Amino acid sequence: MNLTLYLTENCNLRCSYCTREKHAQDMSRETVEKAVELAFSRGKNAGICFFGGEPLLKKDLIYYALELADERSRQTGIPFLSKITTNGTLIDEEFASMAKRANMQIGFSFDGTMQDDCRRTKEGGATFDLMVDKARLLMEHGCDTVAMCVASPEACGKLFESVKLVHDLGFPQMIINPAYGDKVTWTDETFEVLRGQFDQIADYMMELYQKGDKFKVAPLHNKISELIKGINPSKYCHLGIRQLAVSWDGNLYPCTSFLDKPEWYLGSVYEGIDETRRLEMAKRCFTPSPCKDCDLSARCTNSCGCANILNTGSPDMIAPVQCEYERMVISLADRLGDEMYAMGDQRFIDFMGL
Ligand code: SF4
Ligand code: SF4
């Protein structure tokens, strides 16, 4: 099964939109051992995503977990996959080499030219130059890396140039998310700026596509491929079913946005999964009521419980800005998909990986 390990509550950055409290609480080696056991205890695959706070503050635990998982995988024949979501600042040669060897998928949180607007150190220091160096290191090692970019209302006027920078650094793909949560306020004006930036990004994707460049930007690329493949993105979020999050002290929750919320507690790595609560959760419908009759409901991530919790405090309520954002990217993706398809179906099939 897939587990997300919250290795530490601590972080060396203080991003302006971050919703997590920072504490000096780290996972113990014993909890890591129990989590690896749980990951291999059910299902045909085992997966661990290292998360935090900043997980690379606990590199020793990452290397320990990988060693245990490797041994367990050899003993059981169960394939193992590792991932990490990191702010990237602590990546070094040793980590990059290990990540390449282990085929680790790296989510590299990098806001491009918006980095210093929002993602600063505890002391308020800039991180942009450091992050460009770290990005180059990962590219040199050929690590499987996706740049994860958060567009905040204050900085989103630089989103398009950030996308170009990420492309120029050699990343094969990037994911854009708007900043959400109680530290962020979108206004009509800032949302219009975001919309203008996305227009330019769609044009840029078309320009690259015409040149045969396979750079992909989510959510635009995803919205096109999901439509063609008949995938409903609102079904991605199966709270507590597809994966579980493990807090620093070994408790289990459906997702990292629910850590420390007692009403979402699903057991612990020591006592096992509370199957009754897990099944009750699986049966609940998290589709927000305004979405039930919407024509776009099969193309929208409206049922992402963790995004909804961040915005509205409830997993089954959607904030107007999320709805507006989904409508914007779906409409742009449709325009882009039509333009790409018009250039020939075989090229389109190859690009979409059909
Ligand atoms: S790097 Fe992540 S955990 Fe750390 S402050 Fe930024 S958003 Fe929060
Ligand atoms: S577009 Fe808005 S109303 Fe429609 S499914 Fe998405 S969030 Fe719900």
Image (tube, rainbow, N blue to C red):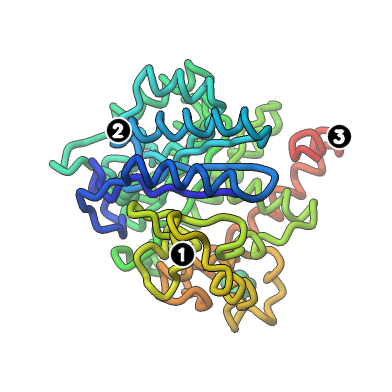
Along the horizontal axis of the image, is 189 left or right of 306? left
Q: CA distance from mark 1 to mark 3?
A: 49 Å
Q: Nearer the viewer, residue 73 or 336?
A: 73
Task: Work out which residue is located at the far left of the displayed protein and give it.
Answer: 123
| Tag shown at residue 346 | 3
Q: Position of residue 249 (x, y in %)?
A: 33, 54
Mark 3 is surrounded, within 10 Å at the Cα level, by few (under 14), some (14 to 19) or many (20 or more) other residues, namely few
Disc 1, disc 2: CB below 8 Å? no
Residue 334, located in which quarter of the rendered image? bottom right
Which kind of residue does numbered mark 2 sit on?
A: Phe
Q: Nearer the viewer, residue 121 or 203?
A: 121
Mark 2 is surrounded, within 10 Å at the Cα level, by few (under 14), some (14 to 19) or many (20 or more) other residues, namely many
Q: Position of residue 222 (x, y in %)?
A: 65, 49
| Tag shown at residue 198 | none
Nearer the camera: disc 1 or disc 2 = 1
- Whether residue 132 appears in this view of the structure is yes
Which kind of residue does numbered mark 3 sit on?
A: Gln
Q: Which quadrant would the C terminus be assigned to in this image? A: top right
Q: Quick check: is the Cβ at mark 3 less than 8 Å away from ligand 2? A: no
Nearer the camera: disc 1 or disc 3 = 1
Q: Nearer the viewer, residue 250 or 227?
A: 250
Q: Identify the residue position indicated by label 1 in the image.
A: 267
Q: Identify the residue position indicated by label 2 in the image.
A: 128
Counting residues from the start of the chain, the first of labels 1 and 3 encountered is 1
The local secondary structure at tag 3 comes to helix
Counting residues from the start of the chain, the first of labels 1 and 2 encountered is 2
